[in-house]
Image: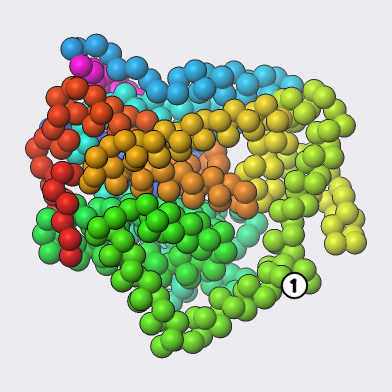
Amino acid sequence: MTLILIIDLISIGLLFIIVLSKGFEATLPLAAFLMMLFPFESQINLPGLFVLTTQRLIVVALFILYLVYGGARGEGGRKKKLPLKYLLLLLMVWMLISAANSVVFTVSLKTVLSQLFDFFVLYYIFAKSVSKVETINKILYAFVMAMFVCSIFGALETYRGWSVNSLFPQAFHRFASLGGESDRGIRAQSTFAHAILFGGALAMAIPMALYLVTLAKTRAGKALLWSATLLMFLNIYKSGSRGPWLALILSLGLLFIFAKGSVRKYLTVISLLTITVLIVRPGVWETIGNLYMQTQDPDTEQGQSYQWRYALYRVAIEHLDGDLGRALWGYGPESFSYLGWQGEFQGMTVKYESCDSSVAALMIETGYVGFLIVAALLLKVAISAFRSFRRIPAPANLLSLVLFVNICAFCFLMTNVLIFGWGQQSYMLWVLLALATIYPRFVLSDSPHGKALCPAGMSDGLAPVHQPRSL
């Protein structure tokens, strides 16, 4: 408890120092860094009320500081409009309807309030407060540096057997019963609730790092970013998680197809390094090959885990199709573990206690309507980011492409892990959604921010966005 109090006090103190010395917008990169750094176990339990995690405390502090020091305005002094406000309002209303009809009303209501204050408020603050491209780049830099630190912890975990999470009291969460060690050995988990969540965040951070390398103006800045990238590659391999591996391949594949210049050169170098590692260290290829073969074998743990996701969709459709009301609004947010469903799985009758898919969870807990609202929100942002990439002149369009591939990676991960609506990776998602919706405004509008893509030049070893650099 003492460690958690110290962390909370330092985090809030740093936010106040930054806002007083540099203004509210300057606190956003620091907040992004801190929210990724600390585990869910960094929390203070307020009995009968709620759990006050460090991330939740940071969001509350940001909101208070925003009310006092924020309120950035757009062109001509007018208040900036909030992108996606109608979809967000619709999602909040539908979640309340779902909670009102929940089989566990209190649990669902707390979950809806958590979604509102943890993520919707965070989205609001970032979407309304970021006023320049320089801040966007610094936020991405903060995410990458946070994942760099987490990767150091992950390397210590896999090679030394020491987990940073051991410093914190155990806390109940969706993956609390699963450890970092399995028949795949010790899997890199770092400060995340599970190795697959850590791997998912890495799959999103690596494309950000490659983008930032193109902006680096010093050798030291490039060296730091490349060091972070290589260590993140090591950790995503050590996470032993198939979903994040595929998400990263998807992301880098999209970058290679659509990006040009330096990024494609970097991806070629990474591909050659990967091939070299597979040749020099045949055990790496053997590990990947064995995991693939085990995934295809339904009698192995990996095969059962893979088949379980399809079983979840079947059981979800069976129960929802039999009840029109539940098909519309579901059984209530976070109600799955209370349903006690049983069904056939590989010739046996089993109890469905875990939901390893955010897609299945959304359908079961908020109905088809809730799932479609979330899908529409993510799809709208992804399409908007890709259109921005096609419309914005190079090299400024690279940022839109990176945001697009990140959203695609997260959507893919939603099909095979419970990743949406909780944890560090969801804080990252909602910040990226905000950035993806506001970035085109700076570049495509006639405002001063649109004319000067990055007015003051970058600090932290980054060059202005309109000055692409190569290695």
Q: Quadrant of residue 148?
A: bottom left
**Residue at 62% across, 79% down:** 290
**Residue at 54% across, 72% down:** 186
Residue on which disc 1 sits: 297
Which one is nearer the viewer's eye here, 231 or 36? 231
Q: Quadrant of residue 236?
A: bottom left
The picture places residue 381, in percent across and down from the top left corner, at 45, 34
Q: Is 30 covered by the magenta stretch?
A: no
The picture places residue 135, in percent across and down from the top left corner, at 22, 37
Which one is nearer the viewer's eye here, 229 or 266? 266
Q: Is residue 301 visible?
A: no
Q: Is 67 covered by the magenta stretch?
A: yes
Report crowding for label 1: few under 14, some 14 to 19, many 20 or more residues within 10 A (C-alpha). some
Q: Which residues are magenta?
A: 62-75
**Residue at 74% across, 53% down:** 310
The picture places residue 1, in percent across and down from the top left corner, at 44, 47
